Amino acid sequence: AKSAGRNGYRFFDAAMTVAADERLRLEADLRRALTNGEFVLHYQPKIGAASRRLLGFEALIRWQQRDGSLVAPARFIPLAEETGLIGAIGEWALNTACQTLQRWRGEGLCNLSMSVNLSARQLRNPALPAQVQGALARSGIPPERLEMEITESVAMEDPARTVEILRELKAIGISLSIDDFGTGYSSLAYLKLLPIDCLKLDRTFVIDIETDPNDAAICAATIRLAHTLGLSVVAEGVETVEQARYLDGLDCDVMQGYYFSRPLPEDAARAFIIHGVRG
Ligand code: C2E
Ligand code: CA
Ligand code: CA
Ligand code: CA
């Protein structure tokens, strides 16, 4: 029987030391989850700040339990990353996200983009460019409709190497974003060298944007810096109309957050495409 925790199941947690046998079992469960098709993607809308139009979605993985409950990625991605299983899980997510977008395009729901998150290990995998090309070829989506998100801390682990890898991905024609921007320590010299299209302003700066002058200043400065470098800015974690208005005033390009929509299962995301965005 499974040892009890939240969800009646004890998951790997970066902050807790998990016994070796427990880790082995979790690893086996993750492997089984992949072969049994227990992972699902939810899709969170990205909204144009000025136009308030739906621009595309970010694919976010969940682990669906037998009882239908969903396990959040923070509770299994770290172990997947440590064990290397993230390679197969990430490739599944990439292919599935591309296929979903292509299905929507086939239904006439066009001109949308799809963003996929990349982990550190995926980024360092020399097979990544071929995997991306494979996912594009199999699904038939145009490269410019696919976007990959790499966190700032992963990008800056080995900046020179990151530049090389991102150049290879960029040559395929996809878009690239730096995720959780502002939480890592970017060297501006490298930021300038990275062949990226977009910075995603971390949610921690958006939460108190109206009340904390420091957060407001960080958002304003990041947006100005990004625009100076020819990059667009996505604000993450927009939860209120006030935050949306404030970011609009700072000339932010794209917004994402619960105010517009939570990440949605595929059918609900399709309904969102059809029924549109709140103003
Ligand atoms: P992330 O890429 O920074 O994704 C944003 C997270 O913030 C998501 O959590 C999303 O559900 C949540 N979020 C969005 N809007 C709001 C909001 O308005 N308020 C609040 N409080 N939260 C909001 P989620 O889905 O639990 O994902 C957590 C992290 O797991 C992601 O952070 C990403 O780093 C990772 N992840 C998710 N899917 C994948 C995947 O397919 N591959 C990899 N490598 N990592 C993934
Ligand atoms: Ca992301
Ligand atoms: Ca993020
Ligand atoms: Ca994050």
Image (cartoon, helix red, strand yellow):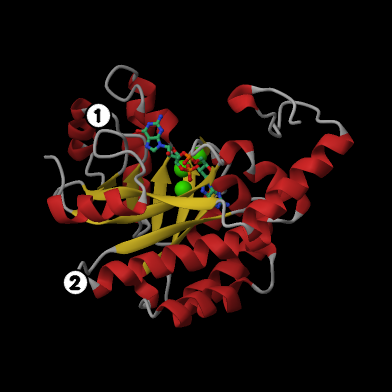
Front position in the image: 196 or 225: 196
- In this orientation, does residue 243 appear? yes
Q: Is residue 177 above or below residue 12?
A: below
Front position in the image: 238 or 233: 238
Q: The residue tagged with tag 2: helix, strand or loop?
A: loop
Q: Disc number at residue 117?
A: none
- The residue sitting at 31% across, 25% down in the picture is 209
> What residue does disc 1 label?
243
Mark in front: 2 vs 1: 2
Front position in the image: 236 or 43: 43
Name of the residue lying farthest toward the top: 211
Q: Position of residue 189 (x, y in %)?
A: 54, 55
Q: Which mark sits nearer the N-terminus, 2 or 1?
A: 2
* Residue type pointed to by label 2: Gly
Q: Quadrant of the N terminus?
A: top right
Q: Quadrant of the C terminus?
A: top left
Tell whether circle 1 marks a residue whose Cβ is less than 8 angstroms from ligand 1. no
- The residue sitting at 41% across, 58% down in the picture is 115
* Residue type pointed to by label 1: Gln
**Residues at badges 2 and 1 in contact (C-beta under 8 Å)?**
no
Q: Position of residue 146 (x, y in %)?
A: 40, 67
> What residue does disc 2 label?
108
- In this orientation, does residue 160 appear? no
Front position in the image: 66 or 218: 66
